[in-house]
């Protein structure tokens, strides 16, 4: 390589690096500013300083008390835990059915499964609301929980099924020869071997429930049943806004997802890539 | 196979949860929704009072000015934001694709906003976009620009949401990055040997090779515009002067504010039709640019 081209390459790299650093600042500055606002006094919020003079950590305890934060957290967990179990387990179950069995109409059913991924949620939103209203489940957590136990979502089934098809059949055959039945093969062979897609489904489900806004908005009416996402938005409307506390609450809601993200970043990034590759 | 009949039964049992869910939460509601879309009903009176009205809902929708407003808002959002986000994402992804240390760090930073709950993002940006003490207008005033009232100004509210969206395009960046990583290095080397410069390589190698990703992202962006809800609900609630009345918000208002269940159901089918048309375009054209490696489903 001659000097000129390598010089050109290095300049291009430098320019790209500068742009990337600039882009990172665009991402980080709003976040930092939110954190710093959450630590300001109400007076400072309107001032020109980026950082507060004294970090007012008590904003956080004030915010947690002003909105019933722990009630909202508890409600979110009441929904989250069963939905996680229901989604991961039932999607794995159905994925196993599609990955390892021969039965009449399987191909057709699988096509239906794929087709349901294209159906926008708005179409079923209204009739499902009416259905749950008729059984008296509006303003309870059931409408947010129960559906997850019925297959856990077409996309999740598809994701796990693709992975299970890659597991060598010799493994289930061997277990079968040892006298294991289908259920035992599923529990003892397939589930442990399918850990990567199960973890990915778990993470996406966690994110989905934690971030879900429209579901709780439709089904939960009384404040003491609100989830965090819904509660935060209502806090903005219900109380005289104090920006510092509002931002403190915002940070508190972000924190768990950000922690999960940094711990499990590999799964996030892989999951996103896989989903685009499959749909594309 | 020896265990065929037993195996067949077991197969049905394993997919039973999904199948029941399909009937209970997809097909059943779809049929109900279809009936509703040809009926008039407020949910307060019992199910017995559903009144069949033929095509009235659709006729009324196409006479409703707000319907066109919501279509306009949604399409403007999609037409501006989709190409804008795609170009920025692709450029950033190409830079992230360089073989240099520290790329993982940048990848993490750029992706981070797209995991933050939409409600939290909305709250942050209400503050950022505040005309007096928001950081955006403060930054603009440093370079001598007087920023508008963003969310309070019907001329700027939609633009504000579009600008805010740039902050969260990490998802798209990652999808492009994985597309770029699938382009064989040999193609670039061959093009370089043939004397193709950076620009030429971009248009003759990169773009064709990642065309499936581009198309996927385009369609997802358009669909995303039609599902856009939380930010519009929390930040502007459709205002000011309906300048951010997204389609999905309009639908929500009809169903859960004025309880026009029939009308809202009809709206949801129109939404479905629009999304379906875009999806069909992808499928119809995909054979031309998507490489299938012949996944022969033998079982």
Image: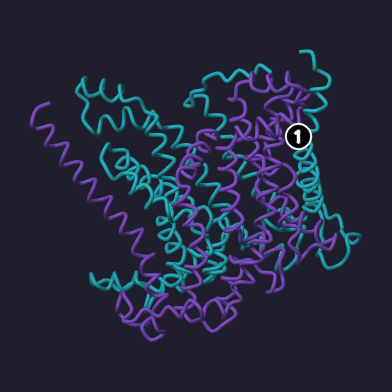
Chain colours: A purple, B cyan
Dot 1: within a 10 Å radius of its alpha carbon, few (fewer than 14), some, or many (20 or more) residues?
many
Quadrant hosting residue B138? bottom left
User: Is residue B69 visible from the viewing direction of this image?
Assistant: no
Q: Position of residue B62 (x, y in %)?
A: 67, 55
Compare residues A139 and A92 and report the one nearer the observer. A92
Quadrant hosting residue B41? bottom right
User: Is residue A76 visible from the viewing direction of this image?
Assistant: yes
Q: Residue at x 40, y 57 (%)?
A: B167
Kindly state the secondary structure of the residue where label 1 is placed.
Answer: helix
Q: Residue at x 31, y 81 (%)?
A: A53
Residue A56 against residue B90 in the figure, above or below: below
Q: Position of residue B64 (x, y in %)?
A: 66, 61
Q: Position of residue A7 (x, y in %)?
A: 11, 37
Q: Position of residue B271 (x, y in %)?
A: 64, 49
Residue A102 against residue A48 in the figure, above or below: above
Residue under circle 1? Answer: B15
Count the marks. 1
Q: Chain of mark 1?
A: B
Of the 4 image quadrants, the one containing the N terminus of chain A is top left
């Amino acid at each position: 390589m001659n000097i000129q081209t390598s010089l050109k390459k290095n300049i291009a790299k430098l320019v790209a690096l500068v742009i990337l650093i600039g882009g990172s600042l665009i991402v980080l500055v709003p976040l930092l500013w939110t954190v710093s606002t959450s630590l300001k006094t109400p007076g400072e919020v309107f001032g020109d300083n980026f950082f507060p003079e004294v970090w007012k950590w008590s904003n956080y305890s004030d915010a947690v008390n002003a909105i019933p934060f722990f009630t909202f957290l508890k409600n979110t967990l009441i929904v989250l835990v069963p939905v996680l179990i229901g989604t991961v387990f039932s999607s794995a179950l159905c994925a196993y059915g599609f990955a390892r069995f021969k039965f009449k109409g399987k191909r057709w059913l699988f096509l239906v499964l794929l087709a349901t991924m294209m159906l926008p949620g708005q179409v079923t939103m209204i009739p499902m609301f009416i259905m749950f209203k008729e059984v008296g489940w509006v303003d309870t957590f059931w409408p947010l929980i129960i559906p997850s136990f019925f297959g856990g979502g077409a996309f999740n089934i598809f994701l796990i099924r693709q992975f299970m098809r890659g597991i060598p059949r010799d493994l289930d055959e061997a277990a079968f020869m040892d006298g294991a039945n289908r259920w035992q093969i599923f529990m003892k062979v397939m589930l442990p071997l399918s850990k990567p897609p199960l973890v990915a489904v778990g993470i996406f489900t966690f994110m989905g429930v934690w971030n879900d806004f429209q579901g709780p908005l439709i089904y939960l009416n009384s404040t003491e049943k609100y989830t965090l996402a819904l509660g935060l938005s209502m806090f903005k409307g219900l109380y005289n806004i104090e920006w510092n506390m509002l931002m403190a609450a915002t940070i508190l809601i972000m924190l768990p997802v950000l922690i999960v993200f940094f711990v499990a970043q590999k799964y996030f990034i892989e999951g996103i890539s896989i989903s685009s590759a499959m749909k594309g | 196979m020896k265990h065929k009949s037993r195996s067949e039964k077991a197969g049905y049992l394993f997919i039973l949860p999904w199948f029941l869910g399909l009937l209970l939460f997809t097909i059943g509601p779809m049929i109900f929704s279809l009936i509703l879309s040809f009926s008039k009903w407020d949910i307060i009176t019992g199910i017995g009072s559903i009144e069949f009205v033929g095509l009235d809902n659709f006729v009324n929708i196409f006479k409703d000015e707000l319907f066109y407003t919501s279509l306009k808002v949604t399409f403007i959002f999609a037409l501006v934001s989709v190409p804008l986000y795609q170009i920025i994402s692709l450029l950033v992804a190409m830079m992230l694709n360089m073989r240099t240390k520290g790329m993982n760090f940048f990848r993490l930073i750029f992706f981070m906003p797209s995991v933050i709950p939409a409600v939290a993002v909305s709250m942050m940006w209400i503050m950022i976009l505040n005309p007096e003490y928001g950081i955006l207008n403060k930054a603009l005033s440093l370079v001598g620009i007087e920023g508008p009232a963003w969310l309070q100004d019907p001329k700027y509210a939609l633009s504000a949401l579009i600008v805010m969206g740039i902050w969260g395009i990490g998802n798209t960046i990652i999808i492009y990055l994985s597309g770029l990583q699938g382009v064989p290095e040999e193609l670039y080397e061959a093009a370089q040997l043939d004397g193709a410069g950076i620009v030429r390589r971009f248009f003759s190698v990169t773009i064709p090779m990642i065309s499936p990703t581009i198309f996927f992202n385009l369609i997802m962006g358009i669909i995303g515009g039609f599902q856009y809800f939380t930010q519009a609900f929390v930040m502007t609630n459709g205002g000011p002067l309906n300048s951010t009345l997204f389609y999905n918000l309009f639908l929500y208002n009809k169903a859960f504010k004025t309880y026009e269940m029939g009308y809202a159901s009809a709206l949801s089918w129109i939404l479905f039709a629009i999304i379906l048309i875009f999806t069909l375009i992808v499928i119809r054209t995909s054979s031309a640019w998507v490489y299938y490696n012949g996944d022969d489903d033998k079982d």
